[in-house]
Image: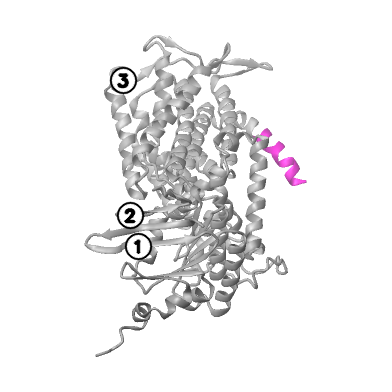
């Protein structure tokens, strides 16, 4: 019963969310929702690299930048080219994928910390290039970017529906919801596929994976390219949505923030990553009134509201990582990984003769479901 | 009959230490071939050379009449699967998933298949699952299919590793001390399993400390000491070889 109505409820809830938000909190919060969805797409992309294949990427924002700048340059007066979205979305995605492979090819022999440092460098290189090249208009960035439009429908313009005038942020909200759903579905299918299993195997034990015939280099490259593709798509949307891009949008802080979303939500678990992304995108704003409370309480501003906001945010992050290292909403597997060491790792009793008999089908021991119990 | 695997003067040095030198042997197809030797004799090094984890400094292997490729995954694709001395399963995946990973090298579905689920991909996925279950049954742990592999008992983990290796459809199954840490009953069960594997036409290469298991089961045995092959032949002959006795029991104190 519950499960039958749940999807319907979800759809209605998602459709109603911007309207409710607008009425309850104001229009700027709807805009925030749009950004939260962009972050969700980014986090889902990074999840493929970090969560599935287990490769620590600290320069992920570079692919976001590649997507954003590809749209900005080919759909603005900057060069004077105005290509349509159906050309630019695949272009941005493919370009980002190519950059993903470019980064991956020379670095995939590296592991763990070393890979993290190289990817961090890569992210910075891209940003510095954007800052210093003249075709990207340097630090000033590119503005007057064409809004996202499909056919004659411009997403930035207001549209009237049933007598209500809906500003562009509503259009973008529904576009982003649609694309996030698509990326979610693709991720889900990848996870359960032959490729997804291979990624998981590499994450678990690379040497064993190689010995089982997995071409780990190609598979890692594929993970990088796939993650980058989603990053590029988000970048294209960001450029069209914002109408302006500059190198300052693509700092290392952004990479770290996206990584936080993945880790905080629950690496490798789609619902967790989605939750992490939405939460971290919205939380800093949610702390804004708290910062203003200071003024009324002490009659004086001791701490700059912006700093206080980030301080609270940091404390919240640290608290979550201490109390729930596996993330807010982890996959059952990840939960097991982190709680096993504390007593649940007791092996099952050995099986009997190797006859393939199923005389003990529901054999007790630690079942997958209760194995994750907090030790 | 041409041998399935030939070691042709294989050698490996680590700095100044010659871990292996001039190793030559032929493994006949369909046999169970034992490789024994005291600790540090170079058995695992030989395994790592064979499976492409190390590159030989001299000589090479010939498998099915052609030289072996260098990369581990290519070696596996050619038909050599292995297990590890210190079990290396994909710990947080289930037993079934572990074996399904083994099917990777014999299946094809790529990104497109994963995302769009065409009929071909669905059939392949079903076949992977069915074959994996079959193999779990073959090694006797089908009832553990949905258990997380890390939680399996030691003996079951060893058997799961064998099932995973068999999933790659090897012509040669190389086992690195499969009986290590097993009690007598488990070792006997393992022996039965190895006979069963051989009966399916797979050649078995066995590195083992347990001399009794090796002598009782192998068709031929090679003995390594200090990186050199000191004896090779049927077990009964090798057992009588004075150099083998010396290596295992120490030199006789003859005047």
Q: Which mark is residue B59?
A: 2
Label pair 1/3, CB-CB below 8 angstroms: no
Q: Residue at x 47, y 72 (%)?
A: B234
**Between marks 1 and 3 in the image, the one whose residue lies nearer the viewer:** 1
Q: Dot 3, how many residues are within 10 Å of its Cα: few (below 14), some (14-19), or many (20+)? A: some
Q: Nearer the viewer, residue B224 or A256?
A: B224
Where residue A345 sits: x, y (%)?
52, 67
Q: Main secondary structure of the magenta part?
A: helix
The reply, left or right, for residue A87 in relation to residue A182 is left
Extreme residue in the top direction: A80
For disc 1, the marked residue is B23
As measured in the structure, the alpha-carbon distance from the residue carrying label 3 to the one carrying label 2 is 62 Å
Where residue B153 sits: x, y (%)?
56, 69
Q: Quick one: quadrant of the C terminus of chain B?
A: bottom left
Q: Nearer the viewer, residue B56 or A244?
A: B56
Residue B187 visible, this orientation: yes
Taking the magenta stretch, the answer to whether it contains residue A12 is yes
**Between marks 3 and 2 in the image, the one whose residue lies nearer the viewer:** 2
Q: Are marks 3 and 2 on the same chain?
A: no
Label pair 2/1, CB-CB below 8 angstroms: yes
Extreme residue in the front direction: B1
* Chain letter behind tag 3: A
Mark 1 element type: strand
- Total residue callouts: 3
Q: Residue at x 52, y 50 (%)?
A: A328
Extreme residue in the left direction: B16
Taking the magenta stretch, the answer to whether it contains residue A277 is no
* Quarter of the view holding residue B122: top right
For disc 3, the marked residue is A140
As measured in the structure, the alpha-carbon distance from the residue carrying label 2 to the one carrying label 1 is 9 Å
Where residue A143 sits: x, y (%)?
38, 17
Q: Nearer the viewer, residue A337 or B242?
A: B242
């Amino acid at each position: 019963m519950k499960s039958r109505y749940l999807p319907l409820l979800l759809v209605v809830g998602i459709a109603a969310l911007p309207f409710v938000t607008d009425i309850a909190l104001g229009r700027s919060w709807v805009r925030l929702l749009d950004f939260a969805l962009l972050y969700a797409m980014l986090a889902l992309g990074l999840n493929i690299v970090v969560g599935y294949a287990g490769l620590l990427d600290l320069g992920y924002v570079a692919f976001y930048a590649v997507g954003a700048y590809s749209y900005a340059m080919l759909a603005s007066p900057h060069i004077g080219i105005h290509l349509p979205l159906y050309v630019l979305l695949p272009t941005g995605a493919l370009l980002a994928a190519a950059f993903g492979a470019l980064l991956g090819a020379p670095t995939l022999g590296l592991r763990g910390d070393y890979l993290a440092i190289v990817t961090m460098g890569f992210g910075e290189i891209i940003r510095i290039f954007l800052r210093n090249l003249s075709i990207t208009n340097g630090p000033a960035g590119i503005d007057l970017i064409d809004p996202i439009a499909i056919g004659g429908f411009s997403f930035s313009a207001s549209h009237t529906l049933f007598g209500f005038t809906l500003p562009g942020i509503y259009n973008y909200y529904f576009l982003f919801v649609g694309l996030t759903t698509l990326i979610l579905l693709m991720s889900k299918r990848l996870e359960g596929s032959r490729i997804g299993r291979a990624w998981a195997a590499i994450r678990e034990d690379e040497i064993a994976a190689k010995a089982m015939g997995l071409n780990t280099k190609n598979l890692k490259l594929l993970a990088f390219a796939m993650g980058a593709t989603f990053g590029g798509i988000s970048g294209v949307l960001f450029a069209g949505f914002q109408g302006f891009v500059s190198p300052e949008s693509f700092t290392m802080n952004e990479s770290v923030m996206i990584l936080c979303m993945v880790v905080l939500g629950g690496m490798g678990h789609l619902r967790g990553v989605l939750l992490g992304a939405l939460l971290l995108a919205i939380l800093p704003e949610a702390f804004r009134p708290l910062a203003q409370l200071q003024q009324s309480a002490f009659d004086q501003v001791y701490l700059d509201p912006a700093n206080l906001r980030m301080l609270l945010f940091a404390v919240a992050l640290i608290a979550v990582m201490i109390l729930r290292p596996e993330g807010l909403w982890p996959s059952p597997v990840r939960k097991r990984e982190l709680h096993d060491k504390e007593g649940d790792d007791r092996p099952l009793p050995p099986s009997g003769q190797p006859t393939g008999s199923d005389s003990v089908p529901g054999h007790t021991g630690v079942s997958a479901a209760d194995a994750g119990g907090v030790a | 009959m041409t041998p399935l695997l030939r070691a042709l003067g294989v050698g490996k040095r680590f700095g100044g230490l010659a871990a292996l030198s001039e190793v030559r042997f032929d493994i006949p197809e369909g046999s169970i071939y034992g490789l024994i030797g005291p600790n540090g004799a170079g058995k695992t090094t030989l395994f790592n050379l064979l499976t492409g984890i190390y590159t030989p400094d001299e000589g090479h292997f010939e498998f099915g009449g052609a030289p072996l490729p260098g990369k581990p995954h290519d070696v596996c694709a050619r038909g050599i699967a292995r297990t590890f001395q210190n079990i290396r399963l994909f710990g947080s995946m289930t037993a079934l998933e572990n074996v399904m990973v083994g099917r990777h090298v014999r299946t094809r579905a790529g990104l497109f298949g994963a995302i769009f689920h065409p009929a071909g991909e669905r059939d392949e996925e079903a076949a992977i699952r069915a074959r994996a279950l079959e193999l779990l049954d073959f090694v006797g742990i089908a009832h553990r299919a949905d258990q997380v592999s890390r939680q399996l008992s030691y003996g079951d983990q060893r058997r799961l590793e064998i099932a995973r290796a068999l999933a790659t459809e090897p012509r040669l199954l190389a086992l690195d001390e499969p009986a290590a840490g097993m009690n007598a009953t488990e070792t006997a069960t393992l022996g039965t399993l190895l006979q069963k594997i051989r009966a399916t036409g797979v050649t078995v290469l066995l590195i083992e400390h347990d001399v009794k298991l090796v002598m009782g089961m192998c068709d031929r045995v090679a003995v390594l000491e200090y990186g050199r092959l000191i004896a090779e032949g049927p077990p009964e002959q090798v057992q009588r070889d004075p150099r083998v006795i010396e290596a295992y029991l120490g030199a006789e104190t003859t005047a």
